[in-house]
Amino acid sequence: MVVTFSKNKMAGNKTSDGISISAIVKLLGQLPGVSIRQGSNHPFIAVKDGMRPCPIATSTNAKIMLVPWVAEATGYDRKAIYSSFRSGGWYQ
C-alpha cells in the first residue's frame, strides 16, 4: 500500500512521545494483514480484520496506544516493537 503524506493533513510529524509518524506508517504497512487508511479525525488509522482501528496522530503516544495494538495484531514483543518504531526498521 502506498500512503502519501499531505503537509496540510499532518501539522506535526512526530507522535507525542517523539516517534516519527512516517516511520510508524511505513513499518505498519509492512505487516501482513495490517493496512493504513486516512481518517477524518486523525491523519492515519491502522486497521486489521477482527481488531479495533488504531489512530495515528501527533496526539498519539506510540508506547501506550500503538505498541499494544501491534503486539496483539502480530504477537511481536512489545519492547522490540517500540525499539523498531524508534529506529525506523523492524528488528530480525
Image (spheres, rainbow, N blue to C red):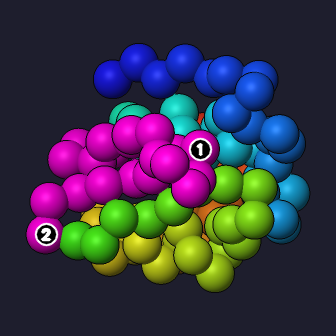
Q: Secondary structure at mark 1?
A: loop
- Quadrant of res 7: top right
Task: Give whichever of discs 1 and 2 has the lower sequence position.
Answer: 1
Q: CA distance from mark 1 to mark 2?
A: 22 Å
Front residue of this view, candidates 80 and 31: 31
Instruction: Name the mark on residue 43.
Output: 1
Against 42, residue 74 (above or below) is below
Residue 45 is left or right of residue 42, and the answer is left
Which residue lies at the image location 50% right of the left edge and 48% below the top edge? 40
Q: Secondary structure at mark 2?
A: loop
Label 2, on which residue?
Answer: 50
Q: Is residue 47 visible?
A: yes
Which residue lies at the image location 28% right of the left edge and 48% below the top edge? 34
Kindly report which numbered mark, 1 or 2, lies closer to the viewer in this rendering. 1
Residue 25 is left or right of residue 53, and the answer is right
Residue 34 is left or right of residue 40, and the answer is left
Q: Position of residue 38 (x, y in %)?
A: 46, 39
Residue 58 is left or right of residue 73, and the answer is right
Against 91, residue 15 (above or below) is below
- Quadrant of res 56: bottom right
Q: Position of residue 29 (x, y in %)?
A: 40, 36
Residue type at the position of mark 1: Pro
Magenta stretch encompasses residue 57: no
Residue type at the position of mark 2: Gly
Magenta-highlighted residues: 31-50
Which residue lies at the image location 56% right of the left edge and 56% below the top edge? 41
Q: Is residue 91 visible?
A: no
